[in-house]
Amino acid sequence: MDDVLENSFNILRMFVRIYGASEAQTMLAKCISEAEEKYDRLLKNLDPQLSSKYQRRCEEATKEGGKISGHALGTWNMPPVIVDEDLYRSNVLNSRSTMSTYR
């Protein structure tokens, strides 16, 4: 949601533009699943010792990022799709200006 306010790049927003609001999350989930499957296949082809070290480092990095349990590479959480970004920005900015008026 902050990405919409700041008009920052966001992969979900890109998928909304490509596939539309109704299909974006499904298509992104499919893309992520395919990438994870490819990752698993490539990981199995690594030397077992290197693979073990790499997985251990991924787990450490995930914990450093604040995640304690779950998949070694973290988990995905998709926010709701904002269909009309201009309206969303306008509503947020209006609510902020209203809030500052009452202070």
Image (tube, rainbow, N blue to C red):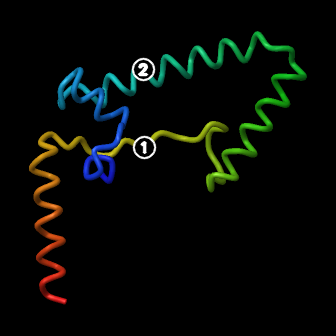
The mark that comes first in sequence, 2 or 1, is 2
Q: Nearer the viewer, residue 27 or 71?
A: 27
Q: In the drawing, what numbered circle is on residue 48?
A: none
Q: Amino acid at mark 1?
A: Asn
- The quarter in which the C terminus is drawn is bottom left
User: For the residue carrying disc 1, how many other residues have a C-alpha within 10 Å: few (<14), some (14-19), or many (20+)?
Assistant: few
Q: Which residue is mark 2?
A: 31
Badge 2 element: helix
What x and y, as percent, mark residue 95? 14, 69
Q: Position of 97 compared to 44: left or right? A: left
Q: Amino acid at mark 2?
A: Cys
Q: In the drawing, what numbered circle is on residue 77?
A: 1
Give the image quarter of residue 71: top right
Give the image quarter of residue 60: top right
Report, in whole angstroms, how far the alpha carbon at label 2 lies from the one at label 1: 14 Å
Q: Nearer the viewer, residue 75 or 11?
A: 11
Give the image quarter of residue 100: bottom left
Q: Position of 9 compared to 16: left or right? A: right
Q: Is residue 11 above or below residue 35?
A: below
What x and y, as percent, mark residue 50? 86, 22
Residue under the image location 18 percent in, 26 percent down: 20
Figure label count: 2
Q: Nearer the viewer, residue 46 or 93?
A: 93
Residue under the image location 69 percent in, 13 percent down: 42
